[in-house]
Image: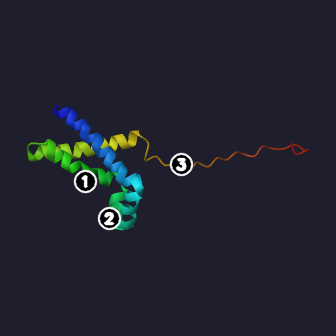
Amino acid sequence: MTICLYFLASILATWRLAHLLSDEDGPLNIVFMLREKAGSGFWGSLISCFYCVSIWIAAPFGIWMGTTTIEKIVFWIAVSGGACILYKLTGENKKQVHIPYYEEEKARDEFGI
């Protein structure tokens, strides 16, 4: 495979693993129990944030693909960035926003209509 295919496969693998750890319960609720055990402190906030998880999952891929230190760092950040773009494109992080709707009251005639 060429480096482009390795790069694309690394992005997809990073997205999949980061999504599993941050947003899914996993088989037999194993990942859910892991997040629950991590709690709401430092480790819990790291594992529940897709962007944080993608940084750490992308690191081995960047180290594997790069030959120099600069290449390893660039690939690391690029793979994480690609996974973050996929995360945004899949709409997993969209929160429903409720916009209040107000209607002006119309003037009524003497019959209340």
Do we see residue 40 in this rendering? no
Q: Earlier in the sequence, mark 2 or mark 1?
A: 2
Do we see residue 4 in this rendering? yes
Residue 44, which numbered label? Answer: none
Residue 97, which numbered label? Answer: 3
Of badges 3 and 1, nearer the viewer stands: 1
Q: Residue at x 20, y 32 (%)?
A: 4
Q: Earlier in the sequence, mark 3 or mark 1?
A: 1
Compared to residue 80, the image places residue 44 above or below, namely: below
Instruction: Look at label 2 and name its amino acid.
Output: Trp
Instruction: Look at label 3 and name its amino acid.
Output: Val
SS at badge 1: helix
**Camera-nearest residue between 19 and 110:** 19
Furthest-left residue in this view? 68
Residue 43, which numbered label? Answer: 2
SS at badge 2: helix
Residue to which mark 1 is pinned? 56
Q: Earlier in the sequence, mark 2 or mark 3?
A: 2
Please provide percent x and percent y for residue 83. Answer: 31, 43
Please provide percent x and percent y for residue 15. Answer: 32, 44
Instruction: Look at label 1 and name its amino acid.
Output: Trp
Please provide percent x and percent y for residue 96. Answer: 52, 48
Q: Residue at x 34, y 58 (%)?
A: 47
